[in-house]
Image (spheres, rainbow, N blue to C red):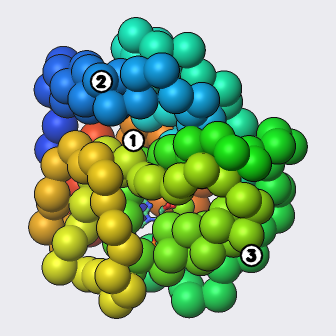
Amino acid sequence: MKEREEILFDAQTIENKVRELAAQISRDYEGKDLVLVCILKGAITFTADLMRRLSIPVEIDFVRAASYGASTVSSRTITITKDIETDIRGKQVLLVDGIIDSGNTLDCLFKRFAEKGPAGVKAVVLLDKKSRRLVEVPLAYRGFEIPDTFVVGYGMDCAEKYRHLPYIAALKPPRR
Ligand code: IMP
Ligand code: MG
């Protein structure tokens, strides 16, 4: 039986928040060399919307950090299956993710990116499941704090489904 979707943030609510974050980022990085690093696959929609709302020029690159399996519990073992191609030495890097849960993914990426000699590395996430954090990770920008519930849509998946949804929904077990 199919899971039920319960909308948490509709497209308009997301858009308003993305504009707000983009305005802050544009202000903070004015006059700097900024590289947005989209964490594949879940951050594609957020990154695409965010970059279009920035009023400053940016470079874009992609990293794929996979915690393997189709499970709804994230794993501690993060594998980088696709790295960035940009030389980030001396540049400002902003890691972009749709959601932070345990913090393992961003923690691992912060460490990996620091070794590449950037001028600085910060992170922006749209959703923060703060109560689930296992590793402290500094977040420069954050959209919404959400409770410990599994969400899909706006790029985020459950076993590769639901990424196309223009809204963010919580997945609930089917009603009997
Ligand atoms: P973390 O490493 O535990 O912080 O998890 C981060 C990654 O797990 C995100 O980039 C997502 O890919 C995935 N993730 C965590 N929570 C959810 C969720 O509720 N829905 C979809 N993906 C999630
Ligand atoms: Mg996933």
**What residue is shown at x 57% (from left), y 32% (from top)?**
34
Q: Mark 1 or mark 2: which is in front? A: 2
Instruction: Check residue 24 in the rendering and tell me which mark sits there, or answer none.
Output: none
Q: Left of 125 or right of it: where is 120?
A: right
Q: Residues within 10 Å of mark 3 (few under 14, many from 20)?
A: few
Distance, label 2 to label 3, CA atoms, is: 33 Å
Which residue shows up at 38% across the image and 86% down it? 135
| In this view, 39 is above or below 7 | below
Kind of residue sitting beneath label 1 = Gly
Give the label, 1 or 3, closer to the camera: 3
Q: Viewer-proximal residue, 84 or 66?
A: 84
* Residue 100 is at least partly visible in this image: yes
Q: Residue at x 25, y 49 (%)?
A: 142
Report the residue marked by disc 2. Answer: 27
Q: Residue 147: x and y, percent?
A: 13, 67
Q: Secondary structure at mark 1?
A: loop
Q: Earlier in the sequence, mark 2 or mark 3?
A: 2
As drawn, the label of residue 79 is 3
Q: Which residue is mark 1?
A: 153
